[in-house]
Amino acid sequence: MDIWNLYISILVFVFGTVIGSFLNVCIYRIPEKMSVVTPRSRCGNCGTTLTGKDLVPILSWLFLKGRCRHCGIKIASRYLWVELTQGLLFLSVYHVHGFALKTPLLWILTAFLTVVFFIDFDHQRIPNKLVLTGLLLGLIPATLHVFHKETLYPSAAWFEPVLGVLIPFLLMLSLAIGGQLVFRKDVLGMGDVKVFAPIGLFLGWQLSLATIWLSYVLGGIFGLFWIMVMKKDKNAMISFGPFIAIATYLVGIFSEKVLDFIL
């Protein structure tokens, strides 16, 4: 790696950690129906408003040894890992796609998926506000597709964004209804169904269907591990959103290879 690429990689990683810091706010506040803009970040124990030196991604947590500067209460390591992971995710997208238009689109999608992952993991639901935000963000690739054509969609058809929303959403809705009829219980949450509307805006219908397939593969593998290795109750509720998020990231970043593998 030459000096220029190393410099850009560092900038991309740092940018990803900054976005990750903001995503930590979203992950905490959206389920609580709080604004992600105001009030400013503060300690959940002593209520002291945090300053810039308390909010430097990764470094603040490390230098403060995971504790509040003011009251000393322990700060969850989740904040550190979200920032670090987001930096690495942004970096991986850049190294696969470089300076292509796909890169910032995948950064936006990855940030959205990170919030989906952790909120569903924590609360076993994907709030409507988050889905609506994803739809608004999805209008960016949809608009670019109409006027530019260089997006994540495999097809160049102008109506691809419409199919991208409808086909995966209707398929997931059918699976949810079918599962309810067959098993007499909810096998999919409506959040899992609705989140495929914004995913379809980013990826188009073909890649979204690939995402659904891969989500079930990943969920099935984890389910077997959960039951056979960890000896957990097979009837326990397991959030499906994290598997959707991981599958969407993999399909988005390796789109052509994933389609080739499936087909």
Image: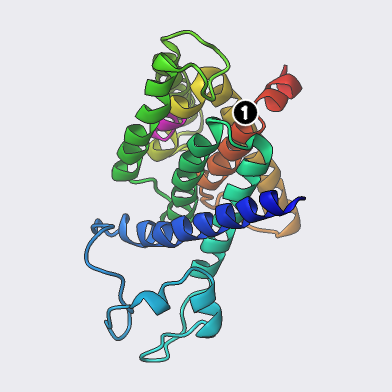
Please determine whether, in this image, residue 27 is positioned above or below residue 154: below
Q: Position of residue 233 (x, y in %)?
A: 61, 55
Nearest the camera: 235 or 83?
Answer: 83
Please determine whether, in this image, residue 117 is positioned above or below residue 208: below
Residue drawn at point x = 45 percent, y = 34 percent: 184
Residue with the mark numbered 1: 213
Q: Can you say which quadrant of the picture contains the C terminus? A: top right
Q: Position of residue 178 (x, y in %)?
A: 47, 24
Q: Position of residue 113 (x, y in %)?
A: 48, 44
Q: How is the image coloured?
A: rainbow
Magenta stretch contains residue 195: yes
Residue 70 visible? The answer is yes
Rate crowding at label 1 as few (under 14), some (14 to 19) or many (20 or more) other CA atoms within 10 Å: some
Nearest the camera: 46 or 222?
Answer: 46
Three-letter amino acid code at the position of disc 1? Trp
* Residue range of the region highlighted in magenta in the rendering: 194-199
Nearest the camera: 160 or 129?
Answer: 160
